Amino acid sequence: MRGTSPQVHLKELWCFLDGTGKAYFTAPHHTGRAAKYRAWDEDYYDAQREPLFEIYSSWGSSEKRHSRLPISGGNNDAPAYFVDALKAGTRFGVIASSDDHATLPGAAHHFRVDAFRVPTLNGHAHKGLAAVRAPELTRSALFDAMRSRQTYATTHARSLVDLHIGDAATGEELRADGTLKGRRTIRVRYTPDAASAARITLMRNGEEFDTKALRGPEIGAAANEVEFVDAEPLERVALKGAKFHPAPFVVYYARIEDGNGAHQWTSPIWIDLE
């Protein structure tokens, strides 16, 4: 990789992987970096080959340009962030991961880039975790769940998070019916990990829609459910003519910030009008 011009283009990588005859997927990561990034005004994207987006790692958060978890080394000004990808019509689930090159997934440490190398002074101490909802703890079940976007991302807290709109769960798509076109109830279920306060922000089409707060020692022992109601007509707020999905749609996801500074992001739910 040299800046934004890779020596081997992603399309070439996909072609090579196709030739192996084995199942695979790729995931864009730290797209917000100043020197190395991928922008969503470019002409390639493949929902089948890249179902997941690394929204956070030791480099920081690529959710949006201005974040409480800024990218180490500086951000870029391109439409290179998760919210830009959603507005362009991509359909990514989210994960977080370490990207620390030290075989310490999810661990907090002093920025070792190699098991025997002197620690460096950049990046975030918490390396990120991918949460996967699967029917059983097997390689095949986890792989299938990730390919179908049954995931959420967390900086380090092992919190339980879920998002629902009607019968649609995290990472799913649904067709708008008469009820959804007029009014939508978005439910977020959340059990914090060793925290007694949290802010839950609902994002609509990559923009903050509403925020609700949870507080008190009792929230740590409950599957807390928060409801958001979007009463704006779906047709009025739908994104239309997006690069990778021109038909009108609305997309929701949730970001949670707990009282200890941990962040979680759900994979989105998409509502299609056509």
Image (cartoon, grey):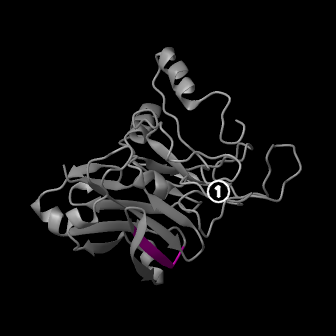
How many labels, in total?
1
Residue occupying the point 43% across, 80% down: 214
Q: Is residue 183 above or below residue 172?
A: below
Residue occupying the point 56% across, 31% down: 10
Q: Which of 260 and 243 lies nearest the eye of the viewer?
A: 243
- Residue 78 left/right relative to 73: left
Look at the image and say whether residue 124 sits in the magenta stretch.
Answer: no
* Place of residue 56 in the rendered image (x, y in percent of width and height, measured from the top left): 58, 55
Q: Is residue 87 above or below residue 41?
A: below
- Residue 45 left/right relative to 112: left
Q: Which residues are magenta?
A: 195-202
The kind of secondary structure the magenta stretch mainly shows is strand
- Residue 131 left/right relative to 272: right
Whether residue 241 can be seen here: yes
* Place of residue 271 in the rendered image (x, y in percent of width and height, measured from the top left): 25, 55
Q: Is residue 243 above or below residue 164?
A: above
Where disc 1 sits, the SS reads loop
Q: Which of 63 and 35 lies nearest the eye of the viewer?
A: 35
Where the N terminus falls, by quadrant?
top right
Quarter occupied by residue 179: bottom left
Q: Is residue 139 above or below residue 271?
A: above
Q: Which of 202 and 181 lies nearest the eye of the viewer?
A: 181
Look at the image and say whether residue 198 sits in the magenta stretch.
Answer: yes
Q: Which residue is mark 1?
A: 76
Kind of residue indicated by mark 1: Asn
Whether residue 169 can be seen here: no
Residue occupying the point 35% across, 66% down: 189
Residue occupying the point 28% across, 67% down: 186
